[in-house]
Structure formats: structure tokens, C-alpha cells
Amino acid sequence: MLMEDDSGMAREAILEVVENQLRDNDPPMVRKTLDRLIGEGYSDDEARDLIEVPLANEIFHAAQDGYKEARYRANLDSLPELPADD
């Protein structure tokens, strides 16, 4: 039960970061990705769910070797293909 609560809280935190990035348009590549995915036929909710994956991936990697905007951008650009688990 605790693991499910933790993963749910983590997902909510990631979603909040995505919402903040979109609201603040920072980085702008997140808004551009959302607009692109919606233009490709994904719903707003589906597009936001997809954007959460590169963000979670970047948070994981940033803890190991620091934030790399180029990596985050590349993973956003590759959506709807999801980043590989390196």
C-alpha cells in the first residue's frame, strides 16, 4: 500500500511540474510539445501524460549527472515515442 501511495504522490508531483512549466512557458519547449501532440491528434490529457514521461526521465538522470536541457529537449521531441530507460 505504501509503495502505491508513494508512486501516486510522485506522479502528482510530476504532473504539477508539467502544469507549472506550461503555465510559465518555461521551458517553452514543453508548450511547443503539447501543441504538437494535440495537433497530431492526442487529447490535451493524453499529451500531458506523454510529457510527464520525459520529465520523470530527466529528473531521474539529473539526480545522477545533473540536468541536461538537450537530453530533455530530445526526449520531448521524440514523443510520442517514449525515452529508453538508460
Image: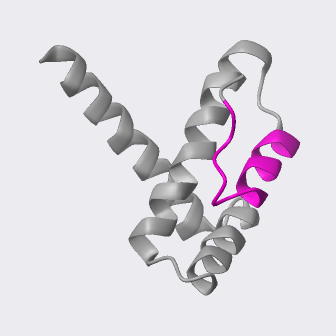
Q: Is residue 76 magenta?
A: yes
Image mark count: 0
Residue closest to the far right: 70
Drawn side of residue 20 relative to residue 54, left or right: left
Residue closest to the far left: 1
Question: In the rendering, at what x and y percent does residue 15 appear?
Answer: 42, 50
Which colour scheme appears in the figure?
one colour
Instruction: Specify start and end residues of the magenta stretch as a single range.
Output: 69-84
Drawn side of residue 59 relative to residue 71, left or right: left
Up-down relation of residue 48 to residue 83 (above or below): below
Question: In the rendering, at what x and y percent does residue 30 appear?
Answer: 66, 63
Drawn side of residue 53 relative to residue 85, left or right: left
Q: Is residue 75 magenta?
A: yes
Q: Quadrant of residue 55?
A: top right
- Looking at this view, is 77 or 84 the one in front? 84
Q: Quadrant of residue 32?
A: bottom right
- Looking at this view, is 40 or 11 the one in front? 40
